[in-house]
Amino acid sequence: MLSNMLLRKPAAAATGITEVGYAVVTDGGTSINLTGIGLQPGDLVLYVAVTESGSVDLPTGWTNLYNGRITTYNYRAAVKLMGSTPDSTVIVKSSGTDGACIAVAYRGVNTTTPIDATMTVTANTVDPPAITTSTNNAIVVPAIAGGGSTAAPTAAPTGYINFHAVRNATSSANECVAMSNKIVPVANLENPGTYTATLSSKQAMTMAFRAA
């Protein structure tokens, strides 16, 4: 079953990269419908997903940023630069009914070197780790994912905008994902801070993408 929504237009970042839309899977569906975002060639799409049933796929043409497992939960983060005909869907699971996922689109990313710094990952926390950006005006994207929650995460780290959170309430595993972002004007060490969330099994990750 597919459950996919474009929930709102995000706040614009101050300079360079902007978030142009997002979509979510809330009930363990296998695909994310990207058509409501209004993707353009050169947009970067990032998805973060978690499932307790099976694995999270890496679709053809996507670049894996992270793929791991904690207790009974499987996690993945992956990105793709949209070509001349942007994708309309992305299959994040080949089967199963458990899971949650958020896909976010960014415009103004460097299409030659979109990844500004190697992502950082910390297990068993809702406090995404610090990352050191390499260039000015990179966008930093901290994310958390996990399961065993009775409610979706409720707040992003202080100073971060475009907060998105989803919980799969139809699954006994209660998978959750949350994301947000912030432009870092000068290349530096950036420590996002903590999400407001209660998860029994969890993974925190921080990514940085380079401005065009």
Image (cartoon, helix red, strand yellow):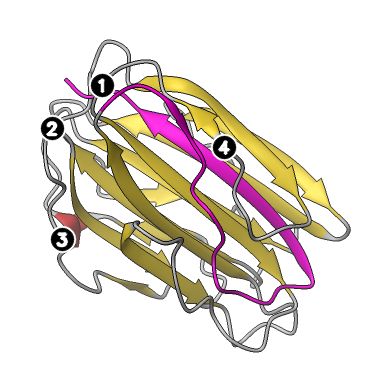
Count of labels in the image = 4
Mark sitting on residue 16: 2
Amino acid type indicated by mark 1: Asn
**How far is the residue under mark 3 from the one under mark 2?**
13 Å
Measured as percent of width and height from the top left, residue 186 is found at 28, 25
Residue that label 3 marks: 11
Which type of secondary structure does the marked residue at label 2 adopt? loop
Give the class, few, some or many, for how many residues have Cα within 10 Å of label 2's Cα (few <14, many ≥20).
some
- Label located before the other in sequence (1 or 3): 3
- Label located before the other in sequence (4 or 3): 3
Amino acid type indicated by mark 4: Ala
Magenta highlight range? 186-212
Measured as percent of width and height from the top left, residue 143 is found at 52, 52
Residue that label 4 marks: 130
**How far is the residue under mark 4 from the one under mark 3?**
23 Å
Q: In this view, does 170 lie above or below 139?
A: below
